[in-house]
Image (cartoon, rainbow, N blue to C red):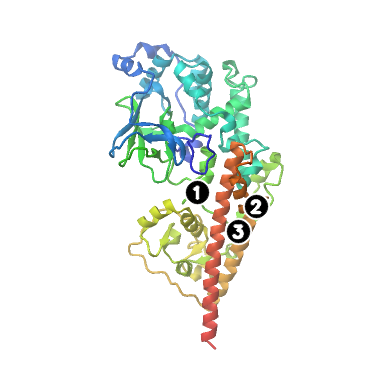
Amino acid sequence: MQHAWCCQCVPLPTSVLGLERQSKRAHHRKRTGRNRCCERLSQKVQSNSAATTPVSTPVQTGTTPYGRGLVSCKQLSSGTKLLSTPFAELLLLPDKVEGPYEKVHEQFWHAHGSVPDELFRFITGAARWDLRLTAWLLWLSKYGSTFWRHYTASLPRESEMTCLLNYSPEEQPELQWLANEAAVQHGWATDSHESLFSSHTGHLKGLQLADTLQDTLWAMSLVRSRTFSDKVHDTEVALIVPTADLANHSFQYNSTYALRTARGAFELNSRRPLNAGDAVCISYGLDKTNAELMRDYGFCVPGNPNDRLDFTASDWQQHAGIIAKPATLLFKVLNSSPAPLKEEERPQLLAGPLLKALGLQGKLEAGKVYPEDMSSQQAEHACAEDASLSRTLAAVLSLPVCESASSIRNGSSSEAKFWPPKSFTDSGEPALRVTLTRKEKVQQRRAIDMLQRHCRSLQAWGTTLQSDEDLFANEESELSPRQRQAICARVEHKKLIEAAQSVLQTYHESVTETAVLSSILNR
């Protein structure tokens, strides 16, 4: 279950959890007396919990363009229920354990048995949601019911997983531009293992959850990559749902999911008609960049429309040499705060002339541009089929732009836009000025030159785009899953840099051509 860029043996995750959930510490009321749950079970709960095997569904596992995943067994209409999983067959951690969610846990305990008091207190306590879910999954993999032991045994091994936290210090340099983030993620996971999950040193050592660091990394990456999130009755919930977690990601997703508390089930439904053999795809997050997808899921999307190159001030001074430092020093490097460039020193491009030179329309500072011969909707569909076009538009949206020359002369940041938002409407917007004065042409050529030099600095790695592509295409090269995925990620990043260089070169030629023509006419 991979995206096209993913190594073929690594299953991919199910749903996206926003960044706000990854840093959130949900506070839960601690509770004892777990046996009271079973005493209050209703006849309906018992009937819902009786089956521990999936019922017949219109989808099955199979090979998709994204790798292994869920496919439609037949032609299906929009709104078809593709999968329904009762509460007894999933893991769920709500922000509040009282109310309707007591019933969820009651169903689970009834179907799969109780857990030790120490584990129960932890998974219903105030630790981070992902740490609590990791502890629960580790325990189920070793001591859970036959259903959960079979499920966890069917999951990929830790050596096959490619989330950033799985990359060891020896493997992190393979990631190049993502090595720093991988060091942070792996360091956090290692600390969590030693302080919580280790059978020798952890706070939960009495439960004997993880004999090795690899055991913890295995569970943590599964929680990262296979967890759904939902919000029910103003309560955030995190879920692991067997079988449903095989649904792949697509920005043009054809299915959605929801937790139906009234029905006591998690449901996967089609949002448009499906043909037999179509891959069932959901969205892991419509605004996810490849860096975020690599961090949490271990794959990247070719031509990801959300990717951006960083042309902000701090990036100009801290890029060179970071990855060459020993892994033990990465945290010190990351915590350094270089002095920002002065506002007037930042290169800025004029939106109107830039769009004209590239044959684009839209609003750069609003975060949406597309070819002049397409509508916005047509461009969205075209980008889904053409990764090169998507990279070009992403590269354009990465550039520091402003609408007027006065903001450049005055060093104003009010009109200079970095990392623009994605909302956009062109109704009632005045047309951008597309001509340049002589002074503006000089200024634009200088800005282009600075940005081109910055692009070249972003390519200062030990491998080139061509060598990476050759290595990936070489069938005889014995690459581990993590090496292969690292190459995929750095190829995609370098292609975005290449697209930015092409955009800048096109604009430079346009500015130079108009300057030469103006000089001839003025003779």
Location of residue 144 in the rendering, given as x and y in whole percent from the top left corner: 49, 17
Disc on the earlier residue, 2 or 3: 2
- Secondary structure of the residue carrying tag 1 is loop
Residue occupying the point 59% across, 48% down: 490
Residue 318: assigned label:
2
Residue occupying the point 60% across, 66% down: 449
Of badges 1 and 3, the one in the foreground is 1
Location of residue 148 in the rendering, given as x and y in whole percent from the top left corner: 46, 20
Cα gap from disc 2 to disc 3, whole angstroms: 14 Å
Q: Residue furthest front?
A: 476
Disc on the earlier residue, 1 or 3: 1
Mark 1 Cα within 10 Å, few/some/many (few <14, many 20+)? many
Q: Is residue 357 above or below residue 483?
A: below
Residue occupying the point 28% across, 39% down: 78
Q: What's the amino acid at mark 3?
A: Cys
- Secondary structure of the residue carrying tag 2 is helix
Q: Is 467 left, or right, of 26 in this rendering?
A: right
Of badges 2 and 3, the one in the foreground is 3
Location of residue 412 in the rendering, given as x and y in whole percent from the top left corner: 52, 64
Q: Nearer the viewer, residue 212 or 65?
A: 65
Q: Are marks 2 and 3 in contact (CB under 8 Å)?
A: no
Residue 455: assigned label:
3
Of badges 1 and 2, the one in the foreground is 1
Residue 205: assigned label:
none
Residue 310 can be seen, yes or no? no
Q: Which residue is mark 1?
A: 302
Quarter of image, res 202: top right
Q: What's the amino acid at mark 1?
A: Pro
